[in-house]
Image (spheres, rainbow, N blue to C red):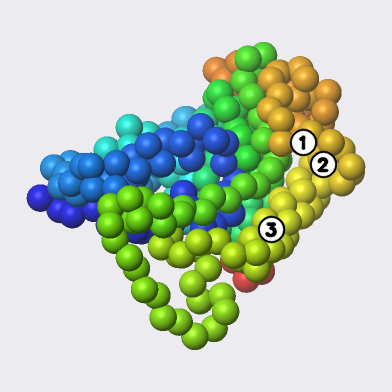
């Protein structure tokens, strides 16, 4: 049976800024806590690849032209790269794979539009901003629309905000524009168990975030500084992508908003159920495909080349 690398998974929950709801992070914590404390061993008999579901192509217009709409599911906890994780009872998606799937759709001449089907509470801040900026630049090549089906919070909202348009249903939610970070302190658990850990180091910050070392005032200040930098980056990205003011974004106070309330705050663009949204996008794409196909392909190819060189 394969052994799970718990320290690697723990990186997603502790010691790094998170663009995630508390619920999403709690899923990881509930998985890790009993294992880190030795209450459950590290053996497992099943593996789940960190990836989205397969992209779903939908035929459009003239079948002979191969015109399609591609739907890319963005579901579950968002992490930087592909890997293996088990037993979390949660879907997992990597920014790396999302970008790869987007690039494939952008390069496919038969694809007229790209849809991100989003249902996620967010994830790590690491790699999130690079992925969002890629989407923001890529939407000049082909329309990339976000359908909120049914949540896009924190890092997932950053991804949605970078899209051409955000479509939300009456009970779907967006927002949670905020950052948090947790620091595991196991010193009391060690004391209670009769263990004493001696850590030798050079460089003041070398033992920051170590669970066997109590947090110092200097470490706290260091963490607060990094959290603020990440928060300002998040706010700045939403200001840019959604054409909102800094004050408008900060005023949300990382709250979440459903349906029309989200539209009123400029966090989404229009109301539609997920299926109605797909139907509307498909109809619009077919209407635009009446333009000369050679001209459309040359324009898309040129934009895709420019994107590859700039990102």
Q: Secondary structure at mark 2?
A: helix
Q: CA distance from mark 2 to mark 3?
A: 17 Å
Q: Are marks 1 and 2 in contact (CB under 8 Å)?
A: yes
As drawn, the residue found furthest toward the left would be 1
Q: Nearer the viewer, residue 52 or 202?
A: 202
Residue 167 drawn at (x, y percent): 67, 26
- Marker disc for residue 224: 3
**Is residue 31 depicted above or below 106 in this figure?**
above
Which mark, by number, is residue 250? 2
Residue at (56, 23) in percent of width and height: 150
On the rendered structure, is 33 left or right of 219? Answer: left
Residue 205 in the image: state x and y as whole percent.
Answer: 56, 75
Q: Residues within 10 Å of mark 2 (few under 14, many from 20)?
A: some
| Residue 289 image position (x, y, % from top left) | 64, 36
Identify the residue at image location x=77%, y=36%. 253
- Residue 252 in percent (x, y) is at 79, 34
* Label 3 – label 1 distance at C-alpha: 17 Å
- As drawn, 178 above or below 118: below
Name the quadrant of the C terminus.
bottom right
Quadrant of the image occupied by residue 166: top right
Of badges 2 and 3, the one in the foreground is: 3
């Amino acid at each position: 049976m394969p052994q799970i690398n718990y320290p690697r998974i723990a990186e997603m929950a502790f010691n790094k800024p998170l663009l995630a709801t508390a619920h999403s992070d709690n899923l990881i914590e509930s998985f890790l806590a009993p294992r880190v404390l030795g209450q459950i061993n590290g053996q497992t008999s099943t593996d789940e690849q960190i990836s989205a579901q397969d992209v779903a192509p939908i035929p459009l217009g003239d079948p002979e032209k191969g015109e399609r709409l591609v739907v890319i599911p963005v579901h579950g906890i968002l992490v930087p790269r592909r890997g293996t994780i088990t037993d979390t009872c949660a879907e997992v998606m990597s920014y790396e794979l999302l970008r790869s799937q987007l690039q494939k759709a952008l390069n496919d001449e038969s694809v007229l539009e790209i849809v991100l089907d989003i249902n996620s509470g967010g994830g790590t801040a690491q790699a999130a901003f690079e992925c969002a900026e890629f989407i923001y630049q890529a939407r000049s090549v082909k329309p990339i629309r976000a359908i909120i089906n049914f949540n896009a919070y924190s890092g997932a909202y950053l991804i949605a905000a970078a899209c051409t348009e955000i479509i939300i249903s009456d009970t779907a939610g967006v927002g949670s524009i905020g950052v948090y970070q947790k620091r595991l302190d196991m010193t009391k658990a060690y004391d209670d168990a009769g263990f004493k850990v001696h850590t030798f180091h050079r460089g003041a910050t070398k033992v920051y975030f170590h669970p066997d070392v109590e947090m110092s005032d200097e470490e706290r200040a260091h963490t607060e500084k990094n959290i603020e930098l990440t928060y300002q980056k998040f706010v700045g990205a939403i200001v840019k992508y959604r054409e909102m003011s800094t004050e408008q974004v900060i005023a949300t106070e990382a709250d979440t908003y459903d349906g029309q309330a989200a539209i009123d705050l400029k966090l989404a663009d229009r109301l539609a159920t997920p299926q109605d949204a797909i139907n509307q996008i498909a109809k619009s794409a077919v209407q635009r495909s009446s333009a000369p196909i050679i001209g459309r392909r040359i324009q898309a190819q040129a934009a895709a080349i420019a994107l590859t060189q700039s990102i």
